[in-house]
Amino acid sequence: MIFLFTSKPIMRNIKYFLLTLITAIIFPQAIMAQSDFTGSEVTGKWNLTIELEEGEFPAWIEINRSGLATLTGSYVGYEGSARPISEVKYSEGDQTYSFSIPPQWTQLNNDLRFEFTLQDNKLTGITFRDDETLPWTAVRAPALVRDEAPIWGNPINLLDQNMSKWIIADNNKFQMQNGVLVNGEVGGNLVTAEKFNDFKLQVEFRYPEGSNSGLYLRGRYEAQIMDQYGSSPYKQSIGGIYGHIAPSINAAKEANEWQTLDITLVGRMVTIVLNGVEVVTNRLIPGMTGGALDNNEDEPGPLMIQGDHGQVEFRKMIITPSVN
């Protein structure tokens, strides 16, 4: 007598195989569409450089395959948060891809419209913004995978009375007051003179009621700081990565209370602890945040404090960079 023991995973695999076989026999065109899907060559994450009169600005796009013959995605401009792309269309005649999204923070009469082509694994495109045409190019975003765990170096105190660790903007409103870094009114952003790869960051901060600020990790990914005590968490919440990663819970204190923020960034992977509660656990940051200094993600970048939104104070800011 032969006993046959079949586990549930094996049974599921057998069912999937039979279903695929039947589909291939009855609908062979569907299997061909899967293997010959037009658009697969543009899927992935791309870092854009947009040309404006004021200079070059970064942006980001992710294109995903959805079903047998559809492309969807997400877009981040040089300002604002990540926004969904319902469909990326393809024209076989001129081999051009296109999509549209509504405006976010800019007052426009029409949706933003994007057209681009792929050549030599690079994108070349144009954004149509009412009567403006903004040319741009894009390269694939690096994976930023770390093969080894970081070796941490010596901690660096970023707060001294002379603000010697920072590049001071012409419209700077930050100043040191009795050992506390204070941004009393809307002004310029504050950027560290030193650039960092992977690091651990310890911060103590507070803000008045209704205020809004942020910390840009490597100058590219904004860790949100905002008065949101008691609200439900979402992708623009305090303790998350603005527009990309929502905190698991809202651990914010009330306005005018001192709060703590601990951030570990290794490659694209980020862990955030807000007021002793781990609200983001080793999550992948897909791309830059609006307002980023650049999207040269394979290079070190500075820490940037957002100064053009609201009042904020910092009484502790220590960064520990990796040395490997």
Image (spheres, grey):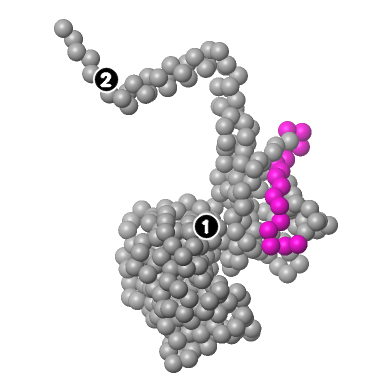
Answer left or right for 43 relative to 257.
right
Q: Nearer the viewer, residue 26 or 204?
A: 204
Disc 1 marks a residue whose amino acid type is Lys
Classify 10 Å Cα crowding around label 1: few (below 14), some (14-19), many (20 and above).
some
Residue under label 2, please give it: 6
Above-or-below relation of 177 to 86: below
Residue 225, x across and y down, in percent: 50, 70
Asked if residue 175 shows in the view, the reply is yes
| Boundaries of the magenta span | 92-107
Q: Nearer the viewer, residue 97 or 173?
A: 173
Residue under label 1, please give it: 235
Asked if residue 217 shows in the view, the reply is no
Callout 2: SS: loop
Q: Residue furthest front?
A: 230
Answer left or right for 7 relative to 77.
left
Which quarter of the figure is the N terminus placed in?
top left
Q: Residue furthest bottom?
A: 178
Q: Residue furthest top?
A: 1
Residue 177, x across and y down, in percent: 48, 91
